[in-house]
Image: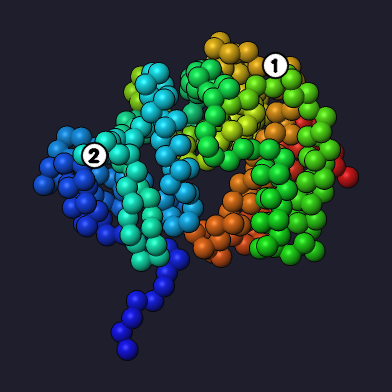
Amino acid sequence: MTFSFPATETTLSAVHLAKLLQEQYKLDIQTSCKLFRTGMNHLYLVTDGGDKYVLRIYTHNWRTKLEVSEELRLLRYLQSNGIPVSYPMPDRNGEFVLEINALEGIRYATLLSYAEGKKVPKFNAQASHTIGVTMAMIHKLTENFQVRRTTYDLKTLVEDSLKRTQSIFSPNIDEMKFVAMLKEYLTLEYKKVNLKSLRTGVVHMDIWFDNLHFDNDDGITLFDFDFCGNGWLCLDIAYFMFQLYNTNLDEVEFKHKAEAFLSGYESIQQISEEEKRILPMAGLCVFLFYLGVQCDRFDTWSNIFLNEDHLRRFTGFLKRWMGYNNIQIN
């Protein structure tokens, strides 16, 4: 008996995607499409003569069409205001979202401008300053702006994330006991925040070297706004600082780059004292959120990636950040 077996995730043919793009975007018959990376979303490099683009195909049931459209609306808004971002290209009908009927069901796709330059994992203090400037420019535009997407609050960042993590890992192992205690600590600290002193708007939620390219003139282009949503603007600052700390083991070097980043940011917008006070706590919230995402997308990351060794390394990052900021939860 012949039948099509259901799938949770497939990798679409680059050859056939090229043909789709040639038709839908009126690209040249010689336009090529090559798989670049799979993961939370699948990325393809599209070459049309001397022009390059990135085709992003969202995994099935990851984002709704509204969520994708709102992300792209934000990108167009930022691009139209001079922010260096990878922005969506309209198709022949002026649409920005494609629907592809894959084996597992409808998947959404969008063609994005190519971010020139390259990733620089070990960037210097000057680059850190540039990232601060760019982040503040974005926040200046997105303060009080809203998208019809996730609102990042205690529930989405901490409570829901703990439930997702507990669906994969036993609550009886030491690392999960630590995560549960951390959740209680963050719940109490969240209630102490002076909300009137915090700016709110749309946040990127993942501004880090993996989502930006540096060009030869030390300018940057940001991309991957997949997690953009509504929340405290300082969540972006906290996440960047957390990542910077955990990738710079020399604390003197970290402080130098952190000061450059904050100086760059505050050359555009001031960070309130309350925002500065809660940066350590906010960084923990965002990292817990991403642990929950990894557990929620188990089929994407696979059991090879998501195991107790990974959890141990992950909680190690959290503990190191807490130690640096003198946070005690026992």
Q: Is residue 300 left or right of residue 312?
A: left
How far across and down, in percent of the image, does residue 194 sit?
A: 78, 23
How far across and down, in percent of the image, does residue 47 sit?
A: 21, 42
The image's colour scheme reads rainbow
Disc on res. 272? 1
Q: Residues within 10 Å of mark 1 (few under 14, many from 20)?
A: few
Residues at marks 1 and 2, CA–CA distance in whole angstroms: 45 Å
How far across and down, in percent of the image, does residue 261 sit?
A: 57, 21
Q: Residues within 10 Å of mark 2 (few under 14, many from 20)?
A: few
Q: What amino acid is labelled 1 in the image?
A: Ser
Q: Is residue 313 left or right of residue 216?
A: right
Q: Nearer the viewer, mark 1 or mark 2?
A: 2
Q: Is residue 51 left or right of residue 35?
A: left
Q: In the figure, 54 relative to 104: above or below? A: above
Residue hosting label 2: 93
In which quadrant is the N terminus drawn? bottom left
> Is the C-beta separation of discs 1 and 2 under 8 Å?
no
| Residue at far top of view | 267
Q: In the figure, 36 relative to 85: above or below? A: below
Q: What amino acid is labelled 2 in the image?
A: Asn
Task: Say how many tags the image has.
Answer: 2
Is residue 90 visible in the rendered structure shown here? Answer: yes
In which quadrant is the C terminus drawn? top right
How far across and down, in percent of the image, does residue 312 sit?
A: 69, 54
Q: Quadrant of residue 13?
A: bottom left
Nearest the viewer among 298 and 252 is 298
